[in-house]
Image: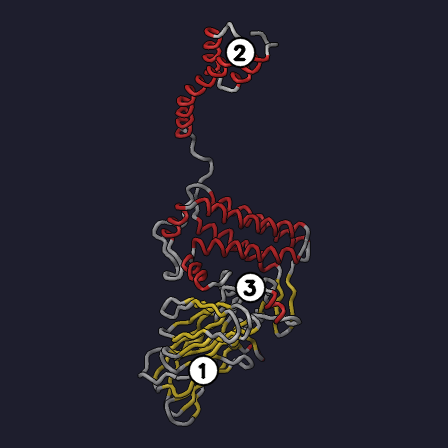
Amino acid sequence: MGSGDPFARVALRLLSSIPPFCRVRAWCVCVGSCMNSKTFSWLCVAGGALIVAAACTTPQTAATASAKSAAPAPDFRLTGTIKDIMDGVVDPSADYLWDSVATIVTKKGIEERRPRTDEDWKNVRRRAIALIEAPNLLMMEGRKVAKPGEKSENPGIELGPEQIQEILDGDRATFIQRAHALQDAGLKALDAIDRKDVDGLSNAGEAIDEACEQCHLKYWYPADAAERLKAGAGSVRKQPS
Amino acid sequence: MSGPAVHVTAAGGGTIKGRVKFTGPEPGNRVIRMGMDPMCAAANQGKRPVNEIYLVGDDNALGNVFVKVEGTFPPASVPSTPVEIDQRACIYTPRMVGARVGQTLVVKNGDNWLHNVHTDSSKRNGINQSTPKAGLDVKLVLKDEEMLRIGCDVHRWMTAWVGVVSHPYFAVSEGKNGTYTIANVPAGHRTITAWHEAFGTLTKAVEVKDGQTVTLDFVYTQKPSA
């Protein structure tokens, strides 16, 4: 079975696709029992490879699981809660972006608020970066909603931390999806900032608002969502600004 | 702030009147971006619609402040006429009203499109009801005392406040000059609170005498911005 033999080439390719340890065993099975027929040698090698590969599967999986269980602890250290990050990073960053573009009416007249100088744009950009990266902090495995013993600030209207944790743990995929939605909205803001596009930043502000509210409706005051659906309305609410 | 000035008035308890002001720069109201709903945007075309959080009059006078006498009083009949708020051009009008426990609140729909009346109640004043077109009103009999926020789920900028009180001794300060008047207050040492949605609550005490009017002003002092 030389290297020019197409059957042998196929056999070799098959063999090469399995781990080295198993490959040796397959090769031995082939050489020892299938020397006389090219066709048979192909079938033999293929079959042998599959059999040996299957035989190798179990110990390999066990080894992987073992390696997983022995995986070193992550380098990051969880010090804050989701509530801390919302309060310390997400909320002030979003507020800064929302406040950066606005029209304010007073008795004296109208103030058009918007980033004007390079420094203004730089400051807005810093907050956008914080807002985009904050969801990564929120999504970190093991991060708790709140400290033990913390309670809802508005019981009856908002869920308590333990209830929020339960919803989050029960459907982590949706939480990840919501976090990504906030990142996507933040990226829109960043794009507008990099283009110094005031209208774009304002529109991104609405997208951020929507992402925030969709997440709040899922985890913070979901009863509202059910009521809203019952009422047939289509959007979300926000505290007065 | 000077002490309360006393004047003689008609009989039937006493009257508390005064003015609400604030110090510092006028915070201003943000123009509402209504682009998310073309109907609202069209209804406000050529205008700069704002939420009147700071209803400012002359000399820093402040309107939309809910002033009430604290405490419990002998039962008084509840007005049979409802308190009304309208949803017009995607804004609640007025933004702030007072009402009695047991009185009916009617939220009208002056717009011929969907709104949703949704109260944030920590008591028993909860409601969440759609008003899909003009003429479909939402009615709510108020059951408990609280500062009740009303919002529209469809248009998040929409906010109104109802000061729900078990007695009739309350008022909302006027926008033009910040004045308020509470009549027929039973005589005695009374605690008065002023509540504003952004500035918060101020509390003062006053002696109310039969047949007299006492003046009680409130001044919100803004912290200098950082």
Q: Residue at x 55, y 64 (%)?
A: B225
In front of the other: B207 or A181: A181
| Label located before the other in sequence (1 or 3) | 1
Dot 1 alpha-carbon crowd within 10 angstroms: few under 14, some 14 to 19, many 20 or more = many
Figure quadrant of the N terminus of chain A: top right
**Image mark 2: chain:** A
On the image, the x and y values in percent for residue B75 come to 32, 83
| Left or right, residue B221 beside residue A153 | right
Q: CA distance from mark 1 to mark 3?
A: 28 Å
Could you tell me if residue B219 is visible in this image?
no
Q: Farthest residue in the left direction?
A: B74
Q: Which residue is mark 2?
A: A39
Amino acid at the residue labelled 1: Leu
Q: CA distance from mark 1 to mark 2?
A: 107 Å
Dot 2 alpha-carbon crowd within 10 angstroms: few under 14, some 14 to 19, many 20 or more = few
Amino acid at the residue labelled 2: Thr
Q: Which residue is mark 3?
A: B225
Please, what secondary structure does the residue beneath circle 2 have?
Answer: helix
On the image, the x and y values in percent for residue B11 come to 38, 94
On the image, the x and y values in percent for residue B25 come to 58, 70
Q: Residue at x 49, y 55 (%)?
A: A214
Of tags 1 and 2, the one toward the viewer is 2
**Image mark 1: chain:** B
Q: Which residue is mark 1?
A: B216
* Mark 2 on the same chain as mark 3: no
* Whether residue B30 is situated above or below residue A27 in the rendered picture: below
